[in-house]
Amino acid sequence: MDPRSRSVIAVVGAGLMGAATAWQLARRGHEVTLIEAHNIGHRHGSSHGSSRIFRRAYADPLYVGLTGRAYEEWRELEGDSATPLLRTTGGLDLGEGRDPEALAGVLEGAGVPYELLGAEAALERWPFIRFDGAVLYHPGAGVVDADATVAACVRRAGELGAQVLTGVRVVGIKDGRVGLADGREVVAETVVVAAGAWLPDLGLSVVLPELRVTQQQVFHFRQRQPADEWPVLVAKDTDMQVYGLPSGSDGGAGPAMKVAEHDRGTPTTADTRTGIVDADSRTRITTLVGDRFPGLDPDPVAEATCLYTTTPDEDFVLDRQGSLVIVSPCSGHGAKFTPLIGAMAADLATGKGEPHPRFRLGR
């Protein structure tokens, strides 16, 4: 690459959102340069691993609608890349804090199939989980392979003509000029910034909402009965909120479940996170698994860390100011929307769409 090259659109960050944006732009015929500070599929941010939850159950009708659109985009991406990415398992919501009855009302209003079950009926269907109240089941939930998604999007973007730069850090973005740490510069008409937890540290000319970066811990537990078909689940009570889903390859050779706290992350930054699993989180999760999930061996077979980047209202950031498009669908629930966010960011980058009011920078 020449010291200065021209690209109609530059995309900074090749995690889930940046990779999906590059794919959406490239398939529309746009000239794209995708820039990643690390290697594709690296483990330093929020986009690595073999399992993320896809679910329709939200208390907010906005996100219920977006999940429906996201499902269609997942199938489009699978078809274009010839790669299976979303596996349907069904999903459970349980615990007083999730309010299954209220969730059922929201899904009813959106026309999303669901069942509302009592504890005995739920136990009969899923005897490897302990229930103590109402349970919402919706069959459209499932598991997304994040690693495979990033790889598929980057591969297809490249095949469709995008230039992919890896192992080079962005040191400045101003007036469509993206400065790189090795002295090169990418000049673009529009720059899409999808830098995840690195976003607060880029010194952008726009005012960002307060973004809280935390290190989260995830744990994988072997199924006692390999043939059991576990759904994804979200459980919340007065003490903690956890989620669970089939682990995929991250759990090792045998079937396993990934279980983690959604809250209680350790404040950090993208460059100072330790990567050391918090022992207190391990204790809380293994205790919960022993108490609530008798179908799992409570000794974790694998564990890892990742990053959340959370806004105060937990809505996404997806907006355009001048030549900059800011893409930060984060707050620990963005992965399920990946190909849709890519499409929405591509619309903003090409002047074909307006940001949703709730996703604006200045909301």
Image (cartoon, rainbow, N blue to C red):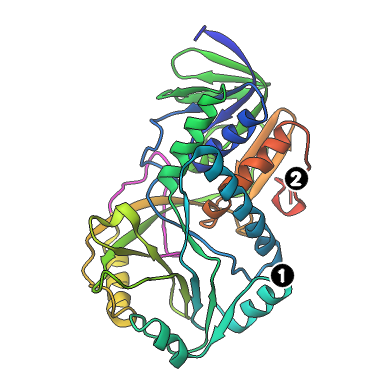
Q: In this view, does 238 lie to the left or right of 324?
A: left
Find the magenta span and give its range: 261-276
Q: How many marks?
A: 2
In depth, the one of 138 and 96 nearer the eye is 138
Q: Residue 110 carries which label?
A: 1
Residue 288, horizontal then vertical, whole percent: 32, 76
Mark 1 and mark 2 lie on one chain; the one further toward the N terminus is 1
Q: What element carries label 1?
A: helix
Residue 140, horizontal then vertical, whole percent: 55, 66
Q: Is residue 271 magenta?
A: yes
Residue 97 in view here: no
In depth, the one of 11 and 30 nearer the eye is 30
Residue 265, horizontal then vertical, whole percent: 42, 59
Q: Is residue 20 above or below residue 241?
A: above
Q: In this view, does 122 lie above or below 57?
A: below
Residue at image coords 66%, 41%:
343
Mark 2 residue type: Pro
Q: Is mark 2 on a helix, strand or loop?
A: loop
Which of the 4 quarters of the picture holds residue 193?
top right
Residue at image coords 64%, 56%:
315
Mark 1 residue type: Ala
Q: Mark 2 points at which residue?
A: 355
Residue at image coords 58%, 52%:
337
